[in-house]
Image (spheres, grey):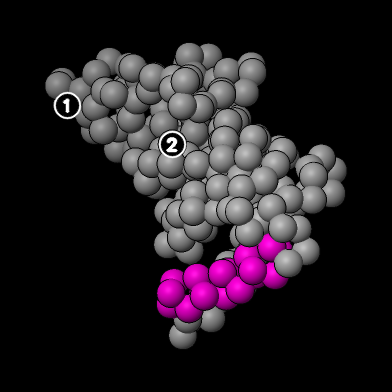
Amino acid sequence: MAEQASDHGVEPAVNDNLTTEVSPFLRIPGELRNAVYRYALLEEETIKINKHTKPCQPGMLQTNRQLRKESGDIYYQENNFLFGISHFDASIYIEWCKSSPRRRWCKTTAHVSRSQNWANLLVWLEAYWNHECGGIVWSEEGKANADAKAATHLFAMVKKMMQRKSLTWEDAKDFLEDAHAALAEIKPRWAWRSGSADLTASLE
């Protein structure tokens, strides 16, 4: 008989013909396993990640393949993650997404602060173009200054260009450099490839 999962965690159907080598924990019903995963893995507060704070992966996610799959789905899909990003240096976030496909789609937000850096922003935009990580999505409910909101529009540009299958990253980069030059005409500090940015937004 197959067991049914109520939501994230246990696969929709799991073979009950378990051998004696299988952990006793995996013999209990999927609903109970999910309850254990949630008790052990879900955080009441947002999990913060930046260059100074890198939480270790829970031990439950470092066990056998089935436990890792079941518990990982709950840990990454039901917790909230906040990345602190300075100078548009999203390298920690990019590597975090690339290390596991399901990390790419979990509930993440970013607080972008301090001076901008066009080179760092281009690296982030290229990773977004390559589907390696999420980009900044502006919400009218959020708060941000004009420079920060300009960056969200650049991610929106890239998203639209990604739909044009004939375009390469080099084509997209040329458009972005033109947009950068236009911003520099409006606000000269963009020409210095740095400026003040401050916003908190979703990463999608």
The N terminus, quarter of image: top left
Most foreground residue, 181 or 9: 181
Instruction: Give residue 160's position: percent from left, percent from top.
Output: 62, 72
Q: Is residue 184 left or right of residue 85?
A: right
Most foreground residue, 2 or 147: 147
Residue 180, compared with residue 90, is above or below; it is: below
User: Which quadrant would residue 15 be assigned to in this image?
Assistant: top left
Q: Residues within 10 Å of mark 1 (few under 14, many from 20)?
A: few
Q: Which residue is mark 2?
A: 92
> For the residues marked 1 and 2, what is the alpha-carbon distance in whole angstroms?
41 Å
Q: What is the magenta segment's predominant secondary structure?
A: helix
Residue 19's label in the rendered image is 1
The magenta region covers 168-184
User: Which quadrant would residue 82 be assigned to in this image?
Assistant: top right
Whether residue 174 appears in this view of the structure is yes
Query: What residue is rendered at 49% in x and 42% in y?
Result: 90
